[in-house]
Image (tube, grey):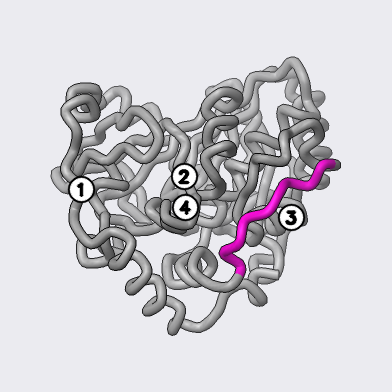
Amino acid sequence: MISQLLRSSTIYAIWLSSVAVAHPFRRQPSNSSLTAITTLSETEIDAFTPYTWYASTGYCQPSQVLTWSCGANCEANPSFHPLFAGGDGVNVQYWYVGYDTLLDTVIVAHQGTNPGKILPLVTDGALAMGTLDSTLFPSLPATIQVHEGFRNEQAVTAPNILMAVEDTLTQSKMTKVTIVGHSLGAAIALLDSVYLPLHIPGITFETVVYGLPRVGNQDFATYVNSNANLTHINNKEDPIPTVPGMFLGYHQPQGERHIEDNNSWVSCPGDDNSSTMCSTGDVPTIFEAKLSDHDGPYNAITMGC
């Protein structure tokens, strides 16, 4: 499926022109957004490190994850007990599920993708939005619409991940699930953060993702804001969190933590904060973007197994 979605690099040029037209000038931050932005302490930044390792490890193939032998990224969280994994890294993104006895949470991780592949996915013909499957997402209003490519990717792994999470909760006796991912994996993880609570009541869910593209419309972002505990961490001038464009109806939910050029981290309140200290304001056009920022580093951790 991924191979069908990922088109040639010529799409990149289309994205360049569409973003430049949509955002001809750098937007100036409003006073309200500037005053609400806060800087994270070193302790607060370091608290994300275990989840960054998990998101990075999502690149590893299932056999490596289940034996926890894919090198430093896997071994960085020795309190992790992997139980389930799937995907082939080609047609289906890798994923794995286990539990961390130190963090006291079940972990669900999705494989990311490199920026050269994620850009075509969020700028090509699969850019259209559609409603979520009512079987996977019962009772959600039809006004909620998401990127069809992301929706279809999440649907492929959703039933297996649900069963894996249910079994892991039973085995671990834990009552919390943390969902992580980077890039395309972040988009799938965000959809899982809406999907899983609809089928597993009485459990606390948290989502920590990196380089998250815009996944859905304003109604989707509003639903996430009200029903999910989301943190999405964006690195410097990474363009991926700013696509697909808002002019197409896409919006980021709240929960952004933005890494500045001096490596400080700030908390950006609201949806698509327009301050130049946050992704939407920092990367208004491709001319301010650095695709190399997409993989990190995130507090000295670069994505990839």
Residue 199, horizontal then vertical, whole percent: 80, 29
Q: Which residue is mark 4?
A: 213
Query: Could you tell which of marks 1 and 2 lies nearer the N-terminus?
Result: 1
Camera sees residue 90: yes
Alpha carbon distance from label 2 to label 4: 9 Å
In the rendered image, residue 128 lying in the magenta stretch gets the answer yes
Q: Which residue is mark 3?
A: 86
Alpha carbon distance from label 1 to label 3: 42 Å
Q: Using residue 80 as the reference point, say whether residue 244 is left or right of it.
A: left
Q: Amino acid at mark 1?
A: Arg
Q: Amino acid at mark 4?
A: Pro
Mark 2 or 4: in front is 2
Query: Could you tell which of marks 1 and 3 lies nearer the N-terminus?
Result: 1
Question: What SS does tag 2 mark?
Answer: loop
Residue 214, horizontal then vertical, whole percent: 48, 50
The quadrant the N terminus occupies is bottom right
Local crowd size for mark 2, using a 10 Å CA cut-off: few (<14), some (14–19), many (≥20): many
Query: Could you tell which of marks 4 and 1 lies nearer the N-terminus?
Result: 1
Q: Amino acid at mark 2?
A: His
Given contact means CB atoms under 8 Å apart, are the residues at marks 2 and 4 in contact? no
For the residue pair 204 and 101, the one nearer the viewer reads as: 204
Question: What SS does tag 3 mark?
Answer: strand
Query: Could you tell which of marks 4 and 3 lies nearer the N-terminus?
Result: 3
Q: Using residue 86 as the reference point, say whether residue 118 is left or right of it.
A: left
What range of the chain is rendered magenta? 126-134
Q: Using residue 237 as the reference point, say whether residue 168 is left or right of it.
A: right
Q: Which residue is mark 2?
A: 251
In the rendered image, residue 51 lying in the magenta stretch gets the answer no
Q: Amino acid at mark 3?
A: Gly
The numbered disc on residue 173 is none
Q: Which residue is mark 1?
A: 27
